[in-house]
Amino acid sequence: MVSQTLSEGLSDAILDYITSNPSSESNYQNASQYLPSGNTRSVLYTSPFPITFVSAEGITLSSADGRTYLDFLGEYTAGLFGHSNERIKRAIQEVVESGWGFGGIGQWEGQLAKGICERFGIERCRFTNSGTEANLMAIAVAKAVTHRKRILVFGGAYHGSVLAFPSTKAQSPLNVPHEFIIGHYNDIQYIKDLQQDPMVTNDLAAILVEQMQGAGGCHAASYEFLQALRALADSTKSILIFDEVMTSRLHPGGFQSFYGIKPDMTTLGKYLAGGSSFGCFGGKEKIMRVFDERRDDGGLVLSHPGTFNNNVISMKAGCVALEILTDDVLVEMNKLGEGMRTEINELCIKYGVQERMWVTGVGSLMAVHFGERQEEEQWKEYVRTKNKDLEDLFWFWMVGNGVYLARRGFVALTIEHRREHVERFLEVVEGFLQKWACIIR
């Protein structure tokens, strides 16, 4: 039985965190003199200050304060291969030895494109520097090909730093100024109603959707919802784009191969260059031929420049990454994640907190939630009643016990995780529940 209130427990946890991480705090204060909020990547900020890391190996992180953490964040899915995969390391070292930045074609981009197209069933593709860039290019291509303006997206979606839609009622003020329709995720009736609105259907260029919303809390779309989107795209002759920047790791051939619903275009990124900067967009040849400068049929030809689109490090690391990530390796990682999520939810039931604490996700990606559980409403609106204080207390507890994950409760496994690592995560979660279940309830 705990005698502390939630407020008291959180205050003590913050004080312990500050006391345990003086070097991280110092680094944060120094950086804040030149970087707003002490960082150049907003998702990494956490109050009162973020942990500063100085090295990493396998699935462990070492901080400036001499503390070691089991990494269950996996660089927000980009670190699928862990922090020091030997084959990827050798590939990068070989590039360093042979030189980089050619300002010309290298030997690796064609090989990487072949591997990606064959793995994900894409006819033609192009490379970018990030998933954000890939989504921007996919939207631009869709508008150019269809000669239409409107883009259907969904509340709770995150397609990049300038393509963020926290809810159906709000989008980031930094978003690029396209004509977005922000729809209800997983709401089939909404799509059916939309299909009857000629104001929308006559000017719809693209539908951009995550088959599982990653930053939006790891909520997966239903097969029926994705079917409805495919039907909407077909009837309006718009372009269906699956954002698989995160979800392509959930099944061999991408999450689309699990559902068996084929988009017109796919965007990729994150892990596919072994942890180096990378993005990719591609799809049907009849769409992607707008980039074929050999075209002589009088059709549209677009230019897609980008100094680092074919940077040698990412190209070669990507080729090696695809070799490492066999179907068996991918399936095993996701199987481990499925079991982990089930066991966390079983612990929540064991301690009677399942209506206030639960886990959602698919395979190796998941999110821990705290608040009022209303699953039947989640498909309508991402923004729901949540308990931020409990979310924070959980994070401080986990990092205080050497387990690193996102402040918002997001977890991403890597191919380096094993059963013993998951058991440690579960052990720390159970310790949290033993102490705080009576408050959570």
Image (spheres, rainbow, N blue to C red):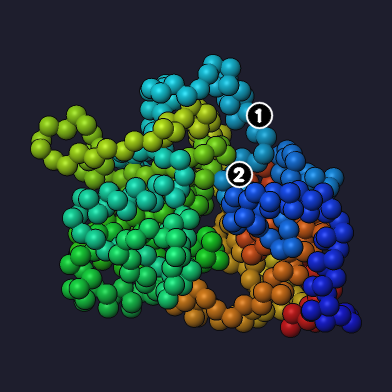
- Disc 2 is placed on an element classified as loop
Residue carrying label 2? 79
Going by the picture, which residue comes out furthest to the top?
98
Label at residue 377? none
Residue that appears at 54% across and 34% down: 321
Whole-percent x, y for residue 313 in the image: 52, 29
Answer with mark 2 or mark 1, whichever residue precedes in sequence: 2
Q: Is residue 8 above or below residue 272?
A: below
Determine the image quadrant of residue 153.
bottom left
Residue type, mark 1 in image? Glu
Determine the image quadrant of residue 303.
top left
Q: Nearer the viewer, residue 280 or 322?
A: 280
Q: Nearer the viewer, residue 432 or 182?
A: 182
Whole-percent x, y for residue 295 in the image: 16, 33
**Callout 2 touching callout 1 (CB < 8 Å):** no
Q: Nearer the viewer, residue 89 or 376?
A: 89
Residue carrying label 1? 86
Going by the picture, which residue comes out furthest to the front?
33
For this view, does 235 lie left or right of residue 69?
A: left
